[in-house]
Amino acid sequence: MDRTNRRPTRQKLSSGDIQGLAKDVLNVARGNLNPETSRRIETASEWLEGYCLSNKFDASTAVNTLISRGVQADAIVDYCIPKIARIYGQEWSNDSLSFATVSVGCAHLQLVLKHIIHQRGFSVLGGEGKCILLVAPAPEQHTLGALVLADQLRRLGFSVKMCLGQPAEDVIKSVFENKFDAILFSASSLEAVKISAQCVNLIRQNYAYQPVVFLGGCILSSVNRVDVPNVFDRVTNKLDVIVNSLESAHDAVSEDNRL
């Protein structure tokens, strides 16, 4: 059977299990989280950080090298890539790296992520789980975090549609043409937050089916939460909070249907 045509099955879980499942996605890559495993991931991150800035960079070589050193592919996605992206951002802020160099490094991290996804050998785009729209509205250029989150959600069985770097009107059109259980906005600037809030207001006003709406992204580490428009159901970067909220919303709808 062609594995590319296989759909993963998503077992029905109780609400008590779902938070643990989400955390397991993040924890499994570190095995038992013992010191040796943690050091291995730390060393791998340091190597990948430098290699992604090399003019000899090759995504396949990067992934194969890390796996040969005992680092699981999911650990590269869940820990190494986000960690290195944060380091690049900090070094740019400190003028240790130029914007061009950081852009190259992040582009190479994205190639590493794409290579890992391709290596898995099957697609979960058609998963049986809830359908999520992941949005980084134009002119947003920081999409690496959104791509990592999409991969994590897909590994949990969710069906994720991406809408990255597209204008607000395209985001609204996608919402109106589909029935999403949730919309996740990723923002790195207050401008992107403002545009995301405008999209949410249009959805609230004109869309009969109301999905759960989240705001996340690196903006949350640099802005006071009180400055975020009060239109989002959840403001978080935590995977377990997102998954838990989706399950809670599903349980509430199911309960309403039984009344």
Image: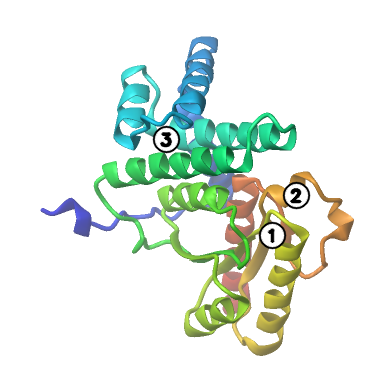
Residue at figure coordinates x 84%, y 54% from the top left: 225
Residue 121 at what x, y percent from top left? 24, 46
Whether residues under marks 2 and 1 lie with C-beta atoms below 8 angstroms apart, the answer is yes
Q: In this view, does 82 lie above or below 183?
A: above
Snapshot colouring:
rainbow
Separation (CA) of disc 3 from disc 2: 24 Å
Residue at figure coordinates x 73%, y 79% from the top left: 201
Residue at figure coordinates x 35%, y 31% from the top left: 63
Q: Mark 3 vs mark 1: which is more N-terminal?
A: 3
Q: Left or right: where does residue 208 sit relative to residue 176?
A: right
Label 2 SS = helix
Label 1 SS = strand
Label 3 SS = helix
Say the numbered circle drawn on residue 220: 2
The quadrant of the picture occupied by the C terminus is bottom right
Separation (CA) of disc 3 from disc 1: 24 Å
Residue 201 visible in rendering: yes
Residue 259 visible in rendering: no
* Residue on which disc 3 sits: 74
* Residue on which disc 1 sits: 215
Q: Which marked residue is nearer to the observer: mark 3 or mark 2?
A: 2
Name which quarter of the figure residue 228 lies in.
bottom right
